[in-house]
Amino acid sequence: MTHPKHRPATDAAFAVDERNRAKRLHERAKYDRAAVHAVLDASPLCHVAYVVDGQPYVTPTLHWRVGDRVYWHGSSASRFLKKAQGTPVCLTVSLLDGYVLARSAFHHSVNYRSAMVFGTAQLVEGREASEAALRHMMESLYPGRWDALRPVTDQELKATRVLYLDIEAASMKDRDGPPSDEPEDLTHPVWAGVIPVRHSLGAAEPDAHTPEGMAVPEGLAALIASGKLRP
Amino acid sequence: MTHPKHRPATDAAFAVDERNRAKRLHERAKYDRAAVHAVLDASPLCHVAYVVDGQPYVTPTLHWRVGDRVYWHGSSASRFLKKAQGTPVCLTVSLLDGYVLARSAFHHSVNYRSAMVFGTAQLVEGREASEAALRHMMESLYPGRWDALRPVTDQELKATRVLYLDIEAASMKDRDGPPSDEPEDLTHPVWAGVIPVRHSLGAAEPDAHTPEGMAVPEGLAALIASGKLRP
């Protein structure tokens, strides 16, 4: 079987090229937009890879998404973020969902979801666009919070560098379910199955300056109760 | 303040060079071995960044550690892992520990731990060394399990490629504790504090071929009860 060299994007699926095309048949990569978006949105934490002077770097950071545009940010003092501008980056979001214990070492695995997106790091320029992007970031985690905060200052905006990429290529992979043992191993006398990995939010801990009895905002309380990391 | 161009390694600390040196004063990076090792060991999941034809890739994978050597693995059919051999890689482990909600957008943050290590991707060669490495992997997650499994076959070992890096440079960063608001913001009437993020294991789910009543192995039960992702 040969792969097409390039599969153009559709409304439902990202383009497939050398960067995101699955290299082996049993890698059941998905290219559809909704599947990629769902993983990007499931966790606030991503890992961004840059190349600086031929050396790869991968840094954890928070990301947020507006359509096919994925944002992240950092300090304006970061030489790193400055160097990344205009260069190709790869941004990956991964969630470990479970340990899969089989009857042979070879068939041990993990249940997971991961999305990998490719694009060029670009700078959000101008006060208005920066503020809008940061408002998006806040609202993506804590709906309604931005307007309750002390307003952002010019100095704070200047100290913050917001980057983004427009997704040029993307793929999503996942695994779910019990181990896939060889038929002849099924009677091997060892416990096999799945141990779920859970990522959840704990009870909110007010700081020392929050007035006693002040309620946790509704949106936050709902987020904590949802059992998810993000609304 | 100027930074030394290079700080040599000691028993307690990794060498500091262009790759791992913190670029800004307020980045409280740590270079000590124990702190880096502790983060590497806290999660089984890492993100490895490679450069292939100038393009960065970051892939999630499981890692394990023996001293200052960090291992990961994949399929022998992976052209990716083959291309990575002999090239510089960056391997990062990150744990999101909490959302930090301040009274200004600017001081919002997250509590986290992350370790970033640098080295050259190398192939584990030979049957014996590969098997020993995979046994280490299994034992790093599930102590005692390897010997209870159906033994690994030559074919399975040939289908598996184990890579490693010897840590040449490394750093660890973390944040913990409540928000750090500006003094003048402390009376702004909004809830502020921390929402902890928890990563834990759920109850073991035996597969359909595990005899009814077969106990979860002692080591696994202890791991699940520990509240940690790794022994």
Image (cartoon, coloured by chain):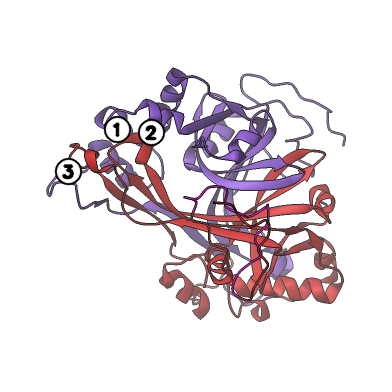
Chain colours: A purple, B red
Count of number-bearing discs: 3
- Amino acid carrying label 2: it is Met
Gap in Å between the C-alphas at discs 1 and 2?
7 Å
Discs 1 and 2 share one subunit: yes
Relative to B73, is A165 above or below? above
Label 2 resides on the chain identified as A
Is B25 included in the stretch rendered in magenta? yes
Label 1 resides on the chain identified as A
Label 3 resides on the chain identified as A
Discs 1 and 3 share one subunit: yes
In the rendered image, residue A103, in percent from the top left (x then y), is placed at 66, 70
Gap in Å between the C-alphas at discs 3 and 2?
19 Å
Location of mark 1 (residue): A145
The label on residue A138 is 2
Would you say the residues marked 1 and 2 are in contact, meaning their CB atoms lie under 8 Å apart?
yes
Foreground pick, B178 / A28:
B178
Extreme-front residue of the structure:
B1
- Does dot 1 land on a helix, a strand or a loop? loop
| Residue numbers of the magenta segment | B12-27
